[in-house]
């Protein structure tokens, strides 16, 4: 009887703001359902990358099909069609890649350009992200800690650069890049993406740095630290959550950007987004190869986000004391 009374008392003293068990189960079911719906396109892309071209365009669509690496082979190679007599006269295939190509009545003609375009994406995406975060952190710290004349106007001006669609200034940027010799260069894309991301990085990081009490830096400088040492050893560790969040947002934009990469590059510095849709197979688009390229294209951002998840889960005000 005593245990029953205690249970009733605990139930009656439960905070009205605390969700009930039924509400928690319902919320969990909604989140899981939304996650599954969001994953359907990604799962379908991965499945398509592991199918043959005929299975990829089969109607009605096949949920289950024999897996094949033809899409990945076609993505990384260029091939040439030959006649049956010429194919029969060739020596046995030297490896499994050549064997898959022979099954398509083709021979290897060399590597494709996808690997170069993928490396360009890595260089441009992570290079611009690094610059955006470094410059954005310095600017955010200056706006947060120093008396900058016209600070509110400057912050609004910085934010206003995000209000205009970037493609609206594509033609002026193209003409400027052509005059400066930055067309089809890695440096040109890195600078462009850095400028576009800088406003977002500054605003996000200023909010994080504002949450860090000034007393931390003052105590460090009383102990003999310089302003720069206090910034590096006190502020940056406390702002790790904000830096990680900002880096992910900047990388996502630079990694997925299509319009500027299509307009300003054609060969040397072309990234993966404008290259993947140009993958042509026999008689049309090579859907397994395109799906394979898309699957590989998702991995760096996924790994980068997983790598920084520890900082993301700490919350915005981690390490700070509210005044």
Image (tube, rainbow, N blue to C red):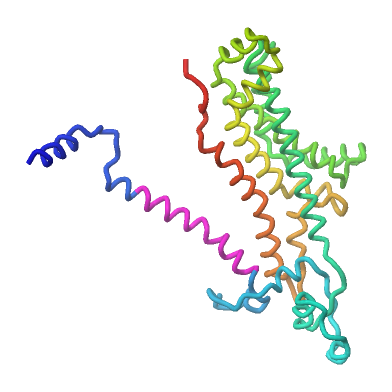
Q: Residue furthest front?
A: 223
User: Residue drawn at (72%, 70%), measured in percent from left and top?
Assistant: 286
Instruction: Examine the rendered structure and indicate whether residue 295 appears above or below residue 63.
Output: above
Magenta stretch holds residue 111: no
What main secondary structure does the magenta stretch of the protein show? helix
How many callouts does the rendering have?
A: 0
Return the x and y of residue 100 as percentages of the image width and height. 75, 78
Examine the image and state in which quarter residue 79 appears: bottom right
Q: In the figure, is residue 78 to the left or right of 258?
A: right
Q: Residue furthest top?
A: 222
Return the x and y of residue 105 as percentages of the image width and height. 79, 84
Instruction: Examine the rendered structure and indicate whether residue 275 appears above or below residue 232.
Output: below
State which region is magenta.
27-49
Magenta stretch holds residue 37: yes
User: Residue drawn at (51%, 28%), measured in percent from left and top?
Assistant: 318
Q: Residue furthest left?
A: 1
User: Residue drawn at (74%, 60%), measured in percent from left and top?
Assistant: 276
């Amino acid at each position: 009887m005593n245990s029953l009374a205690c249970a009733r008392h605990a139930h009656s003293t439960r905070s009205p703001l605390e969700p009930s068990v039924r509400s928690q189960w319902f919320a969990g079911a909604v989140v899981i359902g939304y996650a599954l719906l969001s994953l359907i396109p990604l799962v379908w892309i991965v499945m398509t990358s592991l199918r043959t071209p005929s299975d990829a365009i089969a109607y009605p669509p096949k949920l289950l099909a024999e897996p094949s690496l033809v899409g990945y082979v076609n993505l990384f190679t260029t091939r040439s069609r030959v006649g049956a007599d010429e194919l029969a006269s060739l020596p046995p295939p030297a490896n499994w890649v050549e064997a898959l190509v022979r099954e398509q009545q083709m021979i290897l003609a060399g590597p494709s350009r996808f690997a170069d375009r993928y490396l360009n994406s890595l260089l441009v995406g992570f290079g611009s992200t690094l610059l955006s975060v470094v410059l954005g952190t310095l600017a955010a710290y200056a706006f947060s800690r120093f008396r900058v004349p016209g600070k509110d106007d400057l912050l609004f001006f910085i934010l206003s650069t995000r209000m205009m669609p970037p493609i609206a200034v594509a033609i002026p940027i193209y003409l400027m890049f052509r005059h400066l010799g930055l067309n089809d260069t890695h440096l040109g894309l890195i600078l462009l993406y850095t400028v576009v991301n800088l406003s977002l990085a500054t605003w996000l990081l200023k909010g994080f740095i504002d949450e860090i009490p000034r007393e931390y830096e003052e105590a460090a400088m009383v102990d003999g630290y310089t302003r720069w040492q206090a910034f590096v050893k006190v502020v940056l560790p406390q702002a790790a959550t904000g830096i990680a969040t900002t880096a992910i947002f900047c990388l996502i934009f630079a990694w997925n950007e299509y319009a500027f990469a299509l307009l300003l590059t054609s060969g040397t510095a072309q990234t993966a987004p404008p290259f993947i849709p140009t993958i042509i197979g026999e008689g049309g688009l090579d859907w397994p190869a395109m799906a394979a390229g898309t699957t590989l294209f998702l991995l760096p951002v996924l790994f980068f986000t997983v790598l920084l998840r520890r900082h993301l889960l700490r919350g915005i005000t981690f390490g700070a004391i509210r005044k």
